Image: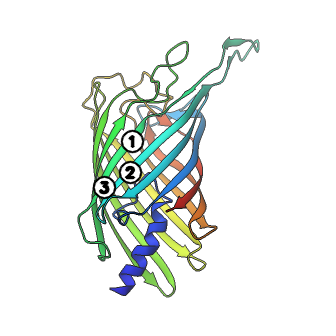
């Protein structure tokens, strides 16, 4: 039992590296939490079509500067906030290949991004060998969904969604090295005739150099239910297209510089997809535990 409690404490560090998974099956302890400021971006000149092939597109990108926070209301109930307080998306000039003239000028918009507000409840007791939690998430459509001259620049999808996610995680130790694994499965109910989604994820991580460094491998995916009426290809070169699907793999490292703060960096890329950018995304963040 002492071993499990030790690993559970180490996994509090892991939570601060994984805003996408929302801390896995481990809620924050009562009165404790952390705050993470991060930059996430993707720039792409190609995308997956609705048949899974890769086609070129004018270079387009999006940047999200966000705050991610968790706070333990009780030992089992945690509040979670993901707030991209500054988002910027752009598209480059479309230039004639024969004359070199600008056919369509590039554009950019900026503002708030779509925000997630969640409550996580731990099904199992803190310190258990298997940590199981359920999370309810509200997706708030704060981002502009039709910016630019043609209305094809987006900081959000414009729809209010509700998602339920179940997580199961465990930790163990090999010699002096702690490990963790977490699996998640979620259902995302979408509005405004967008298709619902099934979301899944797997993570495996190890803590190295006397609790200084977390190294994490991650697999995530989204599968569309294809039960919506919104045109799937209206914004095929956006991360907000309807019926977008993908399976991605990524890696993340988080380094504890001080007792209560550190830095993290990650890279993620899709190995298959439909209606999604065919280029990797990157992030860098600074986190503080409190």
The residue pinned by badge 2 equals 80
Looking at the image, residue 98 sits to the left or right of residue 176; the answer is right
N-term mark: 3 or 2:
2
Asked which quadrant contains residue 257, the reply is bottom right
Question: SS class of the residue under badge 3?
Answer: strand
Label 2: few (<14), some (14–19) or many (≥20) C-alpha neighbours in 10 Å: many
| Labelled pair 3, 1 in contact (Cβ < 8 Å) | no
Looking at the image, residue 90 sits to the left or right of residue 276; the answer is right
Separation of disc 3 and disc 2 at Cα? 7 Å
Nearer to me, 197 or 143: 143
Nearer to me, 217 or 125: 125
Looking at the image, residue 170 sits to the left or right of residue 40; the answer is left
The residue pinned by badge 1 equals 116
Residue at position x 51%, y 28% from top? 237
Disc number at residue 120? Answer: 3
Q: At which x and y percent is residue 67?
A: 51, 46
Q: At which x and y percent is residue 147?
A: 51, 19
Nearer to me, 30 or 111: 30
Residue at position x 51%, y 59% from top? 17
Query: How is the model colour-coded?
Result: rainbow
Question: SS class of the residue under badge 2?
Answer: strand
| Labelled pair 1, 2 in contact (Cβ < 8 Å) | yes
Asked which quadrant contains residue 97, the reply is top right
Disc number at residue 148? Answer: none
Separation of disc 3 and disc 1 at Cα? 13 Å
| Labelled pair 3, 2 in contact (Cβ < 8 Å) | yes
């Amino acid at each position: 039992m002492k071993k499990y409690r030790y690993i559970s404490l180490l996994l509090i560090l892991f939570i601060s590296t994984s805003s996408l998974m929302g801390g896995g099956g481990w809620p924050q302890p009562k009165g404790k939490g952390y705050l993470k400021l991060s930059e996430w971006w993707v720039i792409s000149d190609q995308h997956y079509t609705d048949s899974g092939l890769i086609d070129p597109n004018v270079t387009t990108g999006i940047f999200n500067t966000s705050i991610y926070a968790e706070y333990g209301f009780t030992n089992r109930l945690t509040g979670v906030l993901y707030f991209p307080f500054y988002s910027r998306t752009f598209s480059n000039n479309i230039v004639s290949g024969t004359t070199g003239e600008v056919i369509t000028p590039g554009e950019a918009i900026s503002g708030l991004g779509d925000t997630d507000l969640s409550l996580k409840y731990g099904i199992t007791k803190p310190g258990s060998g298997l940590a199981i939690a359920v999370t309810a998430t509200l997706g708030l459509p704060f981002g502009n969904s039709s910016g630019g001259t043609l209305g094809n620049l987006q900081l959000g999808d414009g729809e209010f969604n509700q998602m339920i996610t179940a997580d199961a995680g465990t930790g163990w130790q090999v010699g002096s090295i702690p490990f963790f694994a977490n699996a998640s499965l979620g259902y995302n109910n979408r509005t405004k005739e967008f298709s619902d989604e099934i979301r899944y994820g797997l993570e495996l991580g190890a803590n190295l150099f006397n609790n200084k460094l977390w190294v994490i491998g991650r697999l995530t995916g989204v599968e569309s239910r294809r039960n919506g009426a919104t045109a799937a290809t209206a914004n095929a070169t956006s991360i907000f297209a309807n019926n977008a699907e993908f399976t991605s793999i990524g890696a993340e490292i988080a380094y504890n510089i001080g007792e209560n703060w550190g830095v993290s960096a990650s890279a993620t890329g899709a190995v298959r997809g439909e209606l999604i950018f065919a280029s990797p995304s990157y992030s860098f963040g600074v986190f503080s535990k409190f």
